[in-house]
Image: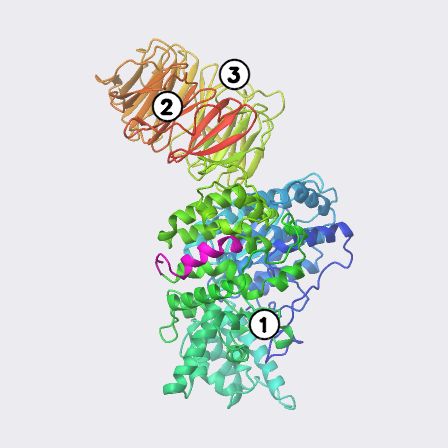
Amino acid sequence: MPNEAVSDETTISTIHITKSLRNVPPKINKLQQAVIDRLAPVIASDAEYHPGGDVYGGHSECLPHTREQLLNDICDWLDESDAPQKHLYWLQGKAGTGKSTIARTVVSRMSRKKRVVANFFFKRGEGDRSRLKRFFTTISAQLVRKLPGLAQMVQDALESEPSLPEQDPRVQFRKLIKEPLQMQTSCHDKAIVIVVDALDECDSKEDLVALVQQLSKSIVRTQGYQSSSGQLLVKYFVTSRLDRHTSSALHIVSEEKCEKIELERATSGTTKQDIECYFKIRLQKIDGFLNPLSESDPWSNPADVGILKKLADRADPLFEFAAAACRYIAQPTVPGGPRLLIQDILDSNSYGDLDGVYLPILRRRFVNLKGPLRDRAWAAFEDVIGTVVFLADSVTVHCLAMLSGQDEQAVRQELLLFESVLVVPRKQDSSLPITLFHESFRDFLIGPEASEEFKLDMQKTHMRLATRCLEVLRGTLKENLCNLKSPGTHRSEVDDETIRTSISEEAKYACRFWAYHLKRCGLQLIDGDNWHLFLSSRFLHWLEALSLLGRFSEIMPLIRELEAIIHVLKAFLDDAHRFIQYFGQTINAAPLQIYSSALTFCPTESVIRKSFVACLPEWITRTPIVEAQWSACLQTLEDHEARVTSIAFSPEGLLACEDRHKNVKIWDIRSGTCLHTLPILGSASISLISHYEFVLSSDGQWLALVGEQHVELFHISSEDSHSFNMLPPYSASIRHAFFSRDNRYFAVCRQGGDIQICDVASATVLQIRRDGLGIPETATISPDGRLLATGDNIGTIVIWEWKEDICLRPITEHGGRIHSLAFSPDGARLASASADRTVKIWDVSILMHNEGSESVGSDMVSLALNGQRFITSTSGASSGHLWDNYGRECAGISFEGMEARGIQVSANGNMCAAFSDEDIILWDMETGGSLPMTNYSGSIFDPSICSIALSADGGRLVAGTEYGTVEVWESRT
């Protein structure tokens, strides 16, 4: 049923219902309340549906005798425990078909059955309700409220990591939901139900995909909280539109894990009948409200039944059409009454299209208005309704008046003309926001298929909003905005009332969204304009305000949005980026440290410092001695317990680091967040072999952890993993492990000569081959997946057509063990590096090396993924060689007296690095020339360097050190 079916207690004419805190368990212990209070600032307001309570906006559940079969099927699926592998039910349908009402009804029915239910109703344009960032904190708060045993675990997680609510959502899921549930000791025989509505209204398509990946993999098992099958099963009920992005995301989910249902197909035989039933119930209530003394039974005579059928014909299959039509018809002040408004709907002559109800609603606003009167009405419509649909978050009537620059009473009057499509709070509910009844109304006005008659000017409205935000901020922002007594005052010590009285609602909105509107107005800014002057005079005050509001984590995305449109401020924004990256944690904890700490200790030539030197505290009479420029070191990751022995980059900016205790951490270097900590495989008795402790796939999605007799494939974005317990008859230790170029296959070479090739997606072993000529030291798979090349300890190379079980002749022209093999991108050539100090380039088609190959020192070899160049050297040598893929030497490279321990080439082939215990040297592979070494040599690295890695584009270099720190550097500065 549609979102707006009204219960018997609801007043039809004006649906103004206050927020509800009902449906909260009557007994919440002190610890639960403390955790809920701690999570309160980081949950999405109004995202939770409270069944049985007053729901702001009049959203309701399915009326009796409608959607019965579908609801029974959904609830039966949620109740059953026979197929625990399917933990996700995905209901898809067109906009307006009643998915949200079905979701609310499911929440209500499961709650009445005393099931543990958490829910999140996404809604575009309503701030945190349209973002993934607050999803898991909101769900966690609900679970803590309903499961007292979770409170301590969530409390511990928040105490150990206070920044957890601002971290990557994958980390939030693991530490606020998954791990606390796994530690539960109380037993229940039914699954926890998590309802996720309107997933397509998640603003970021990347977030949408990330959430789908998380849900598809999130089968939580525990020993305590169990389903009848002996494992915990959290079941998810998800609704979304049928659009390109959600359909693409849906393909991520396998049929084995998800029940996928199309709403219109599942209810094709009953939808029109249900809509007719809905119209009859609603119109009877409207007549009863408008004509309370009438004794007749309305809408039961043949003529009225005919009208009901015509209305159902117009609406089918869109329940939102019926809901909006009934709200429109319920207006008590329109001359001619409901029958006239019904005729408006029928005259639209539209079938199954929301235009058929929205056009009459908007045309009624301008009926009989001509000339200047119509122009004034249209201007009011643009200023008020246009502002509502373009806002990045929902706001109160007062805030809307301030942002639109209009009189508050005039704004309210305009809003009340559109109560059939907008939820407008009463004056006594002034703290509640204006919201849309349904997202389709926004699409009708500004979407790609918007009505030409009422289409709004996007750029004009965003420009007006951006300008007004700037005016608000200029009148609000200043140093020490909340008049804190000490620069060391932590944000957590500032009470909400102080912040509320110091920063108005419109200023809060402007702080968060001025850059959002500025970017969307399509304007390229120029030097000296208002935006330039604002940043150069109020930037630090803006940071302070965002920190006080608990929104400091939003600053980096805002800076990136500004970088795209304010090219004249590139130097300022680049410096701001470094300033925030370096001092962000300090500023977020104590806002006034911007001036007494961050500004004081940033480099003397920093653009930020020069712009705001007047903000240096007067009580600091002698400033510390600091560097003139930012160093190349972007970040230092210090959470490792022992020296870092191996590191690897992914193209997406993830960094895998392993310490000597065999713990692996996955970092997001953009935010400095540790996403995952992976302990030693299997047991403490498993020792990981040198150089192959872990392998990262080229797309950054899979991490392989390799032990002597064990391999685990870990899917980074979803936390899914496949384990290979390598027991007899495959008990020989692993010598080499690698992913194929397309990451479809993962292979291991064993001490006994076996080669095992596994399909990454299914975790099944596809082929095992016996080399037979020696112990395999290395192997590689051709780009097309057809050929397998192996190299062994006695210098033999064998090429296999492994899927066809065909072994091509062995090649024995090397005089020592094979260290490295690599195919060119087209698979036509194979490069081999041997202990005989040669690198050979082979023509795969004829299995012989090219005439142009030469012999060089080759204890170490690194090949770029683009296959155009590679570099070779001998361990401990002070020079190397740069080659093209025909085996021709391009240049000799001097290590400038450094005895290299290892070399690395970036994935794009543009950058090369070599390292010793204390030094790192870089080269531009295009020119063969070295880069300035100022920031990379001498005593910068103390203690010694254990490993290095280059990002895919060569722009960043990571070094792991003896004491367990990991340093991230810009390679070109």
Q: Quadrant of residue 129?
A: bottom right
**Residue 164 x, y percent position in the rendering:** 61, 45
Q: Amino acid at mark 3?
A: Ala
Q: Are marks 1 and 2 in contact (CB under 8 Å)?
A: no
Q: For mark 1, does the 10 Å Cα neighbourhood hold few (<14), some (14 to 19), or many (20 or more) residues?
A: many
**Residue identifier under label 3:** 732
Amino acid residing under circle 1:
Ala
- Judge by depth and name the residue closer to the eye, 658 or 730: 658
- The dominant secondary structure in magenta is helix
Q: Residue at x 42, y 16 (%)?
A: 776
Q: Position of residue 847 (x, y in %)?
A: 27, 18
- Dot 2 corresponds to which residue? 862
Q: Quadrant of the N terminus?
A: bottom right
Q: Is residue 85 above or below residue 691?
A: below
Relative to the observer, which residue lies in front, 139 or 112?
139
3 or 1: tag closer to the N-terminus: 1
* Separation of residues labelled 1 and 2 (CA atoms): 66 Å
Magenta stretch, residue numbers: 523-542
Whichever of labels 2 and 3 marks the residue nearer the N terminus, that label is 3
* Circle 1 residue: 5
Q: Is residue 83 visible?
A: no
Q: Residues within 10 Å of mark 3 (few under 14, many from 20)?
A: some
